Amino acid sequence: MKCCICGPVKNCAPYLPKIFENIEQIGSLFEEYVVIMYYDISQDNTLLLLKNYQRKNPKLTFFVNNKPLSKYRTHNISNARNYCLNTARLKYPTFEYFIMMDCDDVNAKKINLDVMKKALFREDWDALSFNTSPRYYDIWGLSIYPYCFSYNHFENNNKYYDKIQKYVETKLKALPLGKLLPCISAFNGFSIYRMNKFANCYYDGRLNIKLIPKHFMLAHMRAAKSKLICKKYVTVNGFYEDCEHRAFHVSGINKNNAMIRISPDILFV
């Protein structure tokens, strides 16, 4: 088994030493692995840490981008993730897996390597993310019936963040032993993918209301008791942005019948 471990990095310096340590542990599970990162200009010493680590571990390659391509955060993150993925496809066409991870505090905890080992022996997923402690946090990247779209595109988004968080946590706790939770999209800071099920898929952080089938969108409207809205928030402009993972996962489902799953196990403890 071979794996490309990918991720965007920006202002990640406090977390990178532990991230690198966790990446090496994950890499040890594969006969071969490489690390591909996309660096966006930062206000800390992220770039220096990347260069220092590359000298220690030449499996790391990274691209340096010193100018944002868009004023919208999700558009820039999509570009970073797509760069990593395209590099993996081009340079490592025989690799069966790729991992997309965020290089932040979520993944800078101690890793439970047994959780990853167990996952690699399963065949009932094509994209697999994991639960997090103390709460399941990535509600923006989550699409699970009846909450099929972005919670930010409905009224009372703060209220429904909490409601959807409780909903998915209840679902995960109620799973029969050994089962995974099916969904439309989930990331939660770290996911592993079967390369062949996403060979023709790309991240896209632009708002696309046609991404989700109409009957799923109507289900979300009923659950949220709200029509679809576009609103500008402090960090997200809902007129132009959506979580980039949703488009990627939906593309995998539509093109390749990809199985998107969430493990109830906690990978980073």
Image: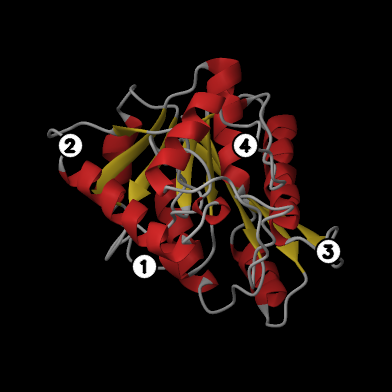
Q: Tell me, yes or no, whether the two marked residues, 1 and 2, touch with CB atoms within 8 Å.
A: no
Crowd around label 2: few <14 · some 14–19 · many ≥20 (10 Å): few
Q: Amino acid at mark 4?
A: Ala
Which image quarter: residue 200? top right
**On the image, numbered disc 1 is attached to which residue?**
109
Sequence-first disc among 4 and 2: 2
Q: Quadrant of the C terminus?
A: bottom left
Residue nearest the observer in this picture, 76 or 43: 76
* 183 horizontally vs 213: left or right: left
Q: Is residue 97 above or below residue 63?
A: above
| Whether residue 95 is visible | no
- The numbered mark, 3 or 2, whose residue comes first in the sequence reads 3
Label 1 Cα crowd, 10 Å radius (few <14 / some 14-19 / many 20+): some
Going from the N terminus, do you reach mark 1 or mark 2 first?
Answer: 1
Q: Which residue is mark 3?
A: 68
Mark 4 secondary-structure assignment:
helix
Q: Residue at x 63, y 50 (%)?
A: 242
**Which label's residue is closer to the chain start, 4 or 3?**
3
Q: At 49% across and 48% down in the image, what residue appears?
A: 226
Three-letter amino acid code at the position of disc 3: Pro
- On the image, the x and y values in percent for residue 265 come to 25, 47
Q: Amino acid at mark 2?
A: Leu
Judge from the rendering whether residue 26 lies leftward or rightward of residue 236; answer left or right: left
Query: In the rendered image, which residue does mark 4 sit on?
Result: 247
| Coordinates of residue 121 in the picture (x, y in percent) | 30, 28
Looking at marks 1 and 3 on the same chain, the residue that comes earlier in the sequence is marked by 3
Q: Toward the viewer: 229 or 178?
A: 229
Q: Amino acid at mark 1?
A: Lys
Between marks 4 and 3, how big is the CA–CA gap?
Answer: 21 Å
Q: Looking at the image, is mark 4 or mark 1 earlier in the sequence?
A: 1
Residue on which disc 2 sits: 175
